Amino acid sequence: MGISDDDGGLATLLDEIIRSPDDLELRLAYADAVEAADAERAELIRIQVRTARTRGAHWPPDRRALDEAEVYGREQGLVYRRGREWAASIAGLASSWHFLRGFPEEIGIDAADFLAQAPELCRRAPVLHLNLRGVLPVIEGFFGSPYLSQIRSMWMVRQGFADEDAAVIARSPYLENLEWMDLGANHIGAAGLDALAASDRLPRLGYLGFLGNKVDDPTPRFADDYDADTPVARELQEKYGPREWLSARPRSVWPPYRDAVWKRYDALSGHALRATPPMKVAVRGTACAASSPVHSETGTTPGGSNSRSWKKELISSVECMKSRAAV
């Protein structure tokens, strides 16, 4: 039988995890504290902390698959059977959720609902990743919310965004910790792309999904030894300075995992290795505390932790739409 996060010491530990979401030792302490009453809860936390470290060590998916094969099925089974129970505190606030590092860090939610529910969400869980719907009708209010200050990733595909909406994103004062953003299949053109590249409000943005907009995607396709900056990427960086999301420098994993764009862990010792963007930036701290996805009440997350397969699907769908339009 499970226990509630409202139980004394667990509530205190949860508060500490929300305040310091990257401190994995706090999560392991929570697992130790909950083990006697709910061994399966403790097991999930430990499994997912281990897999988070391999993502943070930037192991490529094939190496991770070999290492994690024996625990993957167990992890999936635990979340399938007990996930709704363990996410009960946010079940009425978000439409879907995914467990990362043992807690529901990634949620699916309508933007208007996030504006209404953010104080409670950020009090009840370490929410760091958003899969969003309905952003356009509330875009000014949404990107004016201080509760975005500790959000690390946002999936905003097919929102109907145009250049002026990209400019709203670019000037938001609350995206200083945003590391991963997918704006695929919108209607953003050269002016909107320029606004994003010009922004000094996105100092930690390491990945931008831009496929299927009005202009060609200038971001790296593979970020390997055979990739190179596109002409547009070179032009924008000559104009505004280095932008990690435009640079085709080689990486071991691309696209990066949503929860490990900058983080580095030594996968053997589990110790965090501090990693910062290759630019001098001032990162301001603020309000709320918020990937291979493991569970969603409504299905698999659209962006996922590594969206290369999703990008291939989107390339196909965009090409299909273009061919239909030409007929």
Image (tube, rainbow, N blue to C red):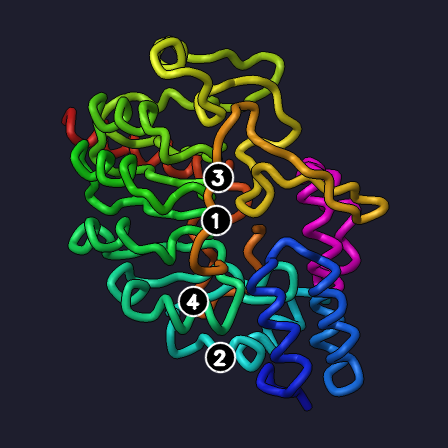
Residue at image coords 57%, 74%? 83
Count how many numbered circles sit on residues in the image: 4
Q: Amino acid at mark 1?
A: Gly
**Mark 3 in CB contact with mark 4 (< 8 angstroms):** no
Q: Quadrant of the N terminus?
A: bottom right
> In the drawing, does residue 321 fall left or right of residue 98?
left
Q: Alpha-carbon neighbours of circle 2 within 10 Å: few (<14), some, or many (≥20)?
A: some
Q: Alpha-carbon neighbours of circle 4 within 10 Å: few (<14), some, or many (≥20)?
A: many
Answer whether residue 63 is magenta in the image.
yes
**Mark 3 in CB contact with mark 1 (< 8 angstroms):** yes
Of callouts 3 and 4, the N-terminal one: 4
**Of the two numbered discs 1 and 2 in the rendering, the one whose residue sits closer to the viewer:** 1
Mark 2 highlights which residue?
89
**CA distance for labels 1 and 2:** 26 Å
Q: Amino acid at mark 4?
A: Ser
**CA distance for labels 3 and 1:** 7 Å
Of callouts 2 and 3, the N-terminal one: 2
**Mark 2 in CB contact with mark 4 (< 8 angstroms):** no
Mark 3 highlights which residue?
283
Q: Quadrant of the C terminus?
A: top left
Q: Alpha-carbon neighbours of circle 1 within 10 Å: few (<14), some, or many (≥20)?
A: few
